[in-house]
Image: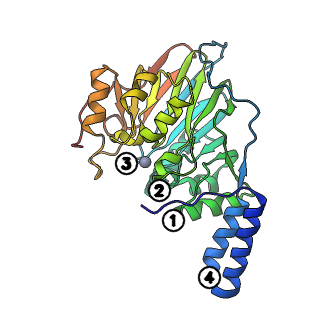
Amino acid sequence: MARKKKFKNNAGVQVLIGIVALVAIAFLGNLHDTNLLDSLSEVVQTDSLESVDNSNNTSTVTNVDGDLIIDYIDVGQADSILIRQGDATMLIDGGTSECKDDLLAFLSDKNIDKFEYVVGTHTHEDHIGSLDDVVNRYDFDTFLFPNTTATTKTFENLVLAVQQKNKKFTVPQVGQEYSLGEAKFQILAPNGDDYSSANNYSIVIKLTYGSNTFLFTGDAESISESEILDKGFNVSADVLKVGHHGSTTSTSKEFLDAVSPKYAVISVGKDNSYNLPTKTTMEKLQEKNIPVYRTDEQGTIECISDGTNITFNVEPGSYAYMED
Ligand SMILES: [Zn+2]
């Protein structure tokens, strides 16, 4: 896998990027790449961090009114999660480019008007594949994206779509909190800036609604999981979106112990060629008797919280696995 370049935010490096772009124009005449370079330096902003609260005070029960609705959308071997609270909406990832029509139809069916937040957890196609189409169709306030980039057409399409909206990616800071209606969410990762696997750049989010908590892990691997634990975050959550589609790379024993979820959700494609979810991960979940909802068996999974109780629209799935 190609090593991913990081966005550079300081002015000096941006000037350097500009010079590189000009040199490319002058000597290489490679207009395509030059456009992308220009786009990248212009399309990123870093969100300011006002305070970090690693204790992630989830024991506080605030009075909430209405429901939090989370749809773990069946997008095949990919991730896409729609979260609604009141009039506020957030989309975490947008599946592959192949699922574009299904995803847009789903959002349209839910009468989505605009998004407060769109999150691209990381650069892989199974997470950002259709986000350019989402951006083209819907307005959004904030597009959260990690401090990383890729040389793929998929990523370029997303950058250009965001830029055409006169918007930028917002790179969130670890520890930062945001509001989504009466829910709030905190950024737990990425905690590093030099990973060999793009998965570890995944933005990891803990969302709190009343006394209910939800963890969204993207494809973060055990290296990121242990960094989150090392930072002292309270990762305990009622519902865990199992990392990396149930791969062995994620859901380390230590992390699963710390999260101690009541329910697990796996976004995974039926008969996928990656042999996911794996035996290792499914046995860990079964050992703890954690009910597992999986998009390959249950299709789109809707999870509703009233701030105290969590219900699902389907029965849990099996602990069946593909071989590691
Ligand atoms: Zn993935």
Residue on which disc 3 sits: 77
| Residue 93 % position (x, y) | 53, 46
Residue 91 or residue 153, whichever sits in front: 153
Three-letter code for the amino acid on which mark 2 is drawn: Glu
Above/below status of 281 relative to 96: above
Label 1: which residue? 152
- Judged from this view, the residue extending furthest toward the front is 230
Q: Earlier in the sequence, mark 3 or mark 1?
A: 3
Residue placed under numbered mark 2 in the picture = 125
Label 4 sits on what residue type?
Asn
* Disc with the residue nearer the chain's start (1 vs 4): 4
The residues tagged by marks 4 and 2 sit, at their Cα atoms, a distance apart of 25 Å
Ligand 1 is within 8 Å of the C-beta of the residue at disc 3: yes
Where residue 45 sits: x, y (%)? 73, 51
Does the numbered disc 2 mark a residue whose Cβ is under 8 Å from ligand 1? no
**Is there CB contact under 8 Å for labels 1 and 2?**
yes
